[in-house]
Image: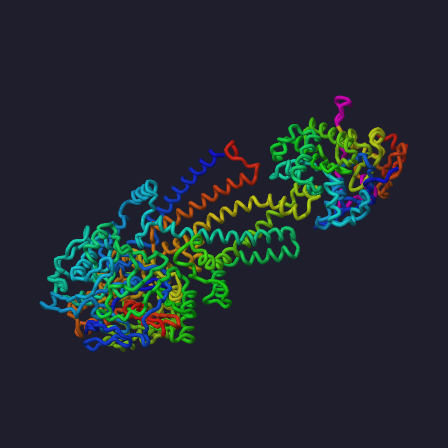
Amino acid sequence: MGAYVVRRLLWLIAVLIAVSLVTFVIFYVLPSADPVLLRAGKNPSPEVVQSITHTLGLDRPWYVQYGRYMERLVLHLDLGRSYQNDASVRHLLWDRLPATLALAFGAMVLWLLIGIPLGIFSAVRHRRAGDRVVTGVSLLLVSAPVYWLGLVALYVFSADIGKLRWLEGAGSYPTHGTIFTNPGEVVPSLILPWIVLAISFAAIYARFVRGSLVEVLREDYIRTARAKGLPERTVVLKHGMRAAMTPVVTILGLDLGILLGGAILVETVFNVPGIGRLAYDSIQTSDLPMIQGTVLAGAFFIVLLTLVVDLVYAFLDPRVRYGQGAP
Amino acid sequence: MRRLARWATVTGTLVALATFGAACGSSDQGSTTASQGTSVETVPQGVKGGKVTVLAAGDVDFIDPGQTYYAFGYMVDYAVMRPLYSFAPGTLDTAQNDLAAGPPVLSDGGRTVTVTLRPDVRYAPPVDRAVTARDVKYAIERAFSANVPNGYAFNYFSVIEGTPKEPTDGVKPISGLQTPDDQTLVFRLKTKESGTLVAALVMPITMPVPPEYAKPFDAKSPSTYDQHVAFTGPYMIPNDPKTGKITGREPGKSIELVRNPNWDAATDYRPAYLDGITIQEGNTDAAVSSRRILQGSGLMQGDNAPPAPTIKQAVQRYPDQLKFVPALGPRYVSLNTSIPPFDDLNVRKAVNAIFDRTAMRLTRGGAIIGDIAWGYLPPGFPGFAESGGLKPPAEFDYLQDPDGDPELAAEYMKKAGYPSGRYTGDAKLLTAAINISPGSQTAAVAQNQFEKLGFKLNFRSLSPETMTTKFCGTPQAKVAICTNVATSADFVDPEALLKPYFYGPAITPSNNANWSELDDPKINAAMDAASALPPGDERVSAWADVNKQIVASAAAVPWIWDKTPLIASKDVQSLGNAYLTSWDLSFTSLKP
Amino acid sequence: MSEPLLDVRDLRVSFATPDGLVRAVDGVSFSVAPGRTLGIVGESGSGKSVAVSTVMGLTRGARGATIAGELRFAGHDLIHAGDEELRRLRGNELAMVFQDPMSSLHPLFRVGDQLVEAVRAHRPVGRRAARIRAQDMLGLAGVPEPGRRMEAYPHELSGGLRQRVMIAMALVNEPRLLIADEPTTALDVTVQAQILELLARLRDELGMAMVLVTHDLGVVAQVADDVAVMYAGRIVETGPTRPLLRTPQHPYTWGLLRSTPRLDGPRDAWPVPIAGRPPSPIAPPAGCRFHPRCPSALAPCAAIDPVLQPAGDGTQRAACILPAAVREEERP
């Protein structure tokens, strides 16, 4: 198992290198907006344009730039400096991470708390009225665009502009402190974003749990559990869910990995200063080093979470074993 | 580059060439009167104290005065630093003496410009000393160095003797900038054409930078002075008292402004009522942030203009919380005169005639948002009245009807050789449009107008940055039509609104602002002549004439002289600064 | 004659499906006395598994299921009993072992934990006591090193061991009746014998009754006291094992015997399969359900639906209208 983990970590590094290369090529070689020109003013002479290009280090061939970038990254863990304000990319990413972590994990807890019971309920009431209601509602919520849900949530519940001023609205995330150092201000500001994120995901998870559990409840070992005289609740919740959860854990890992790269839409509409909003801002300003940084961060989390999921999977399902020639 | 929805682009400074004001600023409540009788408007009930939060979508581009070139950066910079001359809210005609003690003095037929500085302006800690002329000299010199990428130094200040042809390696002295003593700054020019330079003295490049403090930062490439800016205005951003490193700014999140302890109100025309200002960034949804401002307390708008429906609502429900400032130039649709069929004057006139400019204006909010434009000098700008004012002169028959004149358009098409009155060629005209609202709606209306005349468009919907840098700004891209362009004056002189956009030699291979690629020898010559004139009425008239010549060339379809709406909460009172095209933070107060 | 432990009378179990009403069990009656073993034999589709599952109450929740008839176990009316009453019986006095131990054991729980669970579902004992009991039961079921095996997961055990575990799990609460549905079908032949022997031994040691469902007459021969042969949802022949095997009374039973390979027959005697296929449970043939495949069928067989009648030596009964003399002749 240890050898397996080491192999996977090496793979993680390989993926990150590949991602950094692809991102580099896309943004540096084919940028949608030229950061040099955004600074060059009106009708600049070619000399001025050339000078700015040189100052930003963009006049080298792309592979030279990439080499320097990777050298800085590998030797000094330095992700470069933002074009926008010369801040260290690594510092900014680190600074924005707590907000994204708080948003992602908080939402995750919420959507699991809502989605799983609903999925179980739906599976047990398979094809009957209860199931149809839950399935129908979750279909609606899955289809609702997250940004729209966010706006609706603000217009209904936000303390400053909503109809029912129950919850803190956009921009209430405090300028200083994180959920660890300043929970009193951070938590209330995240309740609406958590709910909005959780609603979409809860619907997905309810449907997924339902499907998985319905399949599991058809299995022979469920029949055995009943034959043993176990209460139905134990059969479903212990025997059924234990088997049904493994595919759910796989998706959960993936979803979490993606969210940790930044829930751009939710962070934007609620003005939560996380990695997602940082990515959005940096794309707006063609801040190439920052874009590269956020993309790498996103890739890192996805690959890491995939590894975690695989390890958890091995833990959950004893039939899965890595390393001894297992697939 | 024009300010877009929430994206501040190049702003202009409006410098009245007629007079430079001399408000020496005793900033007690009520209006500030200057020694020469020009008064500065202030808020009716300004009270000292309190804090306000500004809701912004994006971040400033730079605090560094040598690098900032976008409206939002200006909004902050002009509250924390003082250039030689600047504009108080409401006065587009008169530039106030700011760092300068009096108006610039021209001598030697205009070849020498002398500015005398006040002796009593001090930097905030840690620099903590009086500002000298050498600081302004250094500020200009550094803008010519490669480490301080500046977007306009070469365009407007190259007339100074000794300025390099291309950005220098490190900050080099400029021989034409002389400081015989601490308070005197002398500009020796290469020619007598000082008009442009004088007008440009309101730009951030003249905000002082202490050389002994800034040199180590300017030695880096790019310069790191942006994180160590020295402050001279009524406000400052909190910094480390020893190193000067700015601590009150979290990029992408917020900027804090606090009072500058070394600012002396007696030296400034600004009242600076508030004790502190917080700029909260990341409010990208304009509808949400506008609502928060209008319904909340202690809030005001940053760079994010409210959407049209909110403006309508504000006009009806919150009229006291809404003000307008004129934008610095018209919006128009450019026609590339180097690409057929737009190389034909009659075709261009036909396009002008067919355009329903009222419909275009509706996409931005209708009549409240501005006047239908016919020329390139907007209301309130020098040269506007001289060109003819709001109504287009009779000779421009193709611009008389704001709703469009189809018959006239057909006539012009016939004159151009299309007997049916419609375009029958098979060119597919590459059209660059913006993909965000309301620009996208405007582009759709514009497309309709062209199609009325039978044109077929290869319509590309692009992000604002892509549109300006890769399409419209690159002549090589051969874009025939740019639907969402606008002029924007860097300073208050008609040259700023006409030359970069319609002067043949101004065309550059990248970031070209002459989107029409107009290169008419007669117009070029007229511009050269007008540019050479010294500041004054003759210069204004000459440029007004150029304006009319450009309109006569029908190189574009101007459609609105719009106004920028500004909103604030009901307990906040402020003045809009027409030069900054935003609220003026130094003239903002809570209601008593 | 003691009161039968399990008494099934005219059990009918049908399922409503989109294709029509499936009559899986169509009037089945049998009984099992305490300590006796009944073997139920039939092809797949004969309804034998549905019948015994219904006894356990496992068909109750199925979609579109209709259960009718009488079903008594140890004084309980299993058809009308409440869910809780049934639950208390299952795994306790009434236990079941299933065909495929790989899929019938929960793959994600340790074997020992599954056993402990079975104990504690019905006995108010602590974990430690339950574990001891579970381990003892494993030992009794012939699992070597039971203490170590408790920690194993099902996939870590061989087929034979798994079935021993299942049996241990079913017997851990000393049921009065064990139903074994094809307990050896999924196992190797060598292991099969061991398992059957185990079942027989445990049955004797615990004094329990057993119902053994199988398609294999050989299995029945070893273990059962009585046999019931099922076809198309009905019982077509019953009787004590020895007489039934020696002198079967129903043509279907003859077919089954003929199709079973025998060690003691001539070397080149191939097993003879029964021609045709089992009938559709939705639309069974008119008259005797077996008659389309019966080599001895007569004309009236297509019209008369026979009921079980005494036959043979009196202890046997068969549902066939063939006269006894004809049967004597036709029997292989």
Of residue A21 and residue B524, the one placed in the foreground of this image is A21
Q: Residue at x 51, y 58 (%)?
A: A195
Q: Magenta-highlighted stretch: main secondary structure?
A: loop
Task: Find residue C275 and report its image quarter.
Answer: top right
Q: Is residue C239 above or below residue A298?
A: above
Of residue A139 and residue B301, the one placed in the foreground of this image is B301
Residue B447 in the image, given as x and y percentages of width and height = 38, 65
Task: Find residue A244 and report its image quarter.
Answer: top right
Span shown in magenta: C261-290
Would residue B406 be visible to someone looking at this image?
Answer: no
Q: Is residue B587 above or below residue C225?
A: below
Residue B515 in the image, given as x and y percentages of width and height = 28, 62
Task: Find residue C40 and report its image quarter.
Answer: top right
Q: Residue most toward the top?
A: C267
Q: Is residue C57 magenta?
A: no
Would residue A118 be visible to someone looking at this image?
Answer: yes
Q: Is residue C266 magenta?
A: yes
Numbered-mark total: 0
Of residue B189 and residue A225, the one placed in the foreground of this image is A225
Residue C126 in the image, given as x and y percentages of width and height = 67, 40
Q: Is residue A50 left or right of residue B405?
A: left
Please identify the quadrant where the N terminus of chain B is shown.
bottom left
Report the colour scheme.
rainbow
Q: Is residue A15 left or right of residue B84?
A: right
Q: Is residue B91 left or right of residue B53?
A: left
Q: Is residue C226 above or below residue B396?
A: above
Please identify the quadrant where the C terminus of chain B is shown.
bottom left
